Image (cartoon, helix red, strand yellow):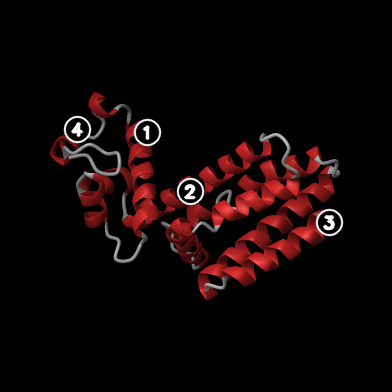
Amino acid sequence: MARDGINDGADSDDSHPGSAAHGTTGDRRAQLVAAAVDHVTAHGIADLSLRRLGAAIGVSHRMLIHYFGSKEQLLVEIVRTSERCRRDQLSRLRTEPGLSPADVARRLWRQLTDPALAGQERLFFEICGHALRGRPEAVPVLDGLVTDWLEPLVAAETAAGVDPVTARSRARLGLATVRGLLLDLLATGDRAGVDAAMEEFLRLYYGPK
């Protein structure tokens, strides 16, 4: 039976990890990451192991080791994929007609703080903590952690008429604020307080509604 979008057949996967049945190695790797993201979103990361994850998405833990090397390297890929999905959400929101920059920020904030994504947010901060302590397998998650976000955020600022230098500073401030409030929400569970803080930040950042 297929689970989380990955077909059963772990034995054939183990024997032929790059077989045509599953496309190229890169395609298969991306498919496994996507399924892992879906699983983490639905079930969180408590007691997560490669064996449990593999069973949940229909492959053996040996296959996950083949593609990712270790549990932590797979978790880094989950974080990177989740971050890329959020940037895609931002890009889509920016193209919706009739939305002001503040409206885009509010919409994105509601998406980021969806309780269903709490597992992904916890994983983000956990892996960042490992990376900052110098754990080699986690360090790659720091690549682009800020810079990958600056391009779309700066583009949004300059489109609103902000000069490029100021736009970059504002983008960095906005990113840091959102991440800080996400950590606040995970630590305190005070959704009303965090939402109010975000609304005050947007008022200071963009001006009154």
Q: Which residue is mark 2?
A: 82
Give the position of the N terminus as an image quadrant: top left
- Looking at the rendered structure, the secondary structure element under dot 2 is helix
Whether pointer 2 and pointer 1 mark residues with C-beta atoms closer than 8 Å, the reply is: no
- Looking at the rendered structure, the secondary structure element under dot 4 is loop
Q: Earlier in the sequence, mark 3 or mark 2?
A: 2
Residue at coordinates 75% horizontally, 44% vertically from top-left? 100
Q: Is residue 113 left or right of residue 152?
A: left
Q: Earlier in the sequence, mark 1 or mark 4?
A: 4
Q: Crowdedness of circle 2 by 10 Å Cα count: few (<14), some, many (20+)?
A: many
Q: Is residue 208 left or right of residue 28?
A: right
Q: Label 1 to label 3, Cα distance in Å?
A: 45 Å
Q: Earlier in the sequence, mark 2 or mark 1?
A: 1
Q: Which residue is mark 1?
A: 26
Whether pointer 1 and pointer 3 mark residues with C-beta atoms closer than 8 Å, the reply is: no
Residue at coordinates 33% horizontally, 66% vertically from top-left? 46
Of 102 and 35, which appears nearest the observer?
Answer: 102
Of tags 2 and 1, which is closer to the observer? 2
Q: Earlier in the sequence, mark 3 or mark 4?
A: 4
Q: Earlier in the sequence, mark 2 or mark 4?
A: 4
Q: Label 2 to label 4, Cα distance in Å?
A: 28 Å
Q: Label 1 to label 4, Cα distance in Å?
A: 14 Å
Of tags 2 and 4, which is closer to the observer? 2
Whether pointer 1 and pointer 4 mark residues with C-beta atoms closer than 8 Å, the reply is: no
Give the position of the C terminus as an image quadrant: bottom right
Q: Which residue is mark 3?
A: 207
Q: Earlier in the sequence, mark 1 or mark 3?
A: 1
Whether pointer 2 and pointer 4 mark residues with C-beta atoms closer than 8 Å, the reply is: no
Amino acid type of the residue tagged 2 in the rendering: Ser
Of tags 3 and 2, which is closer to the observer? 3
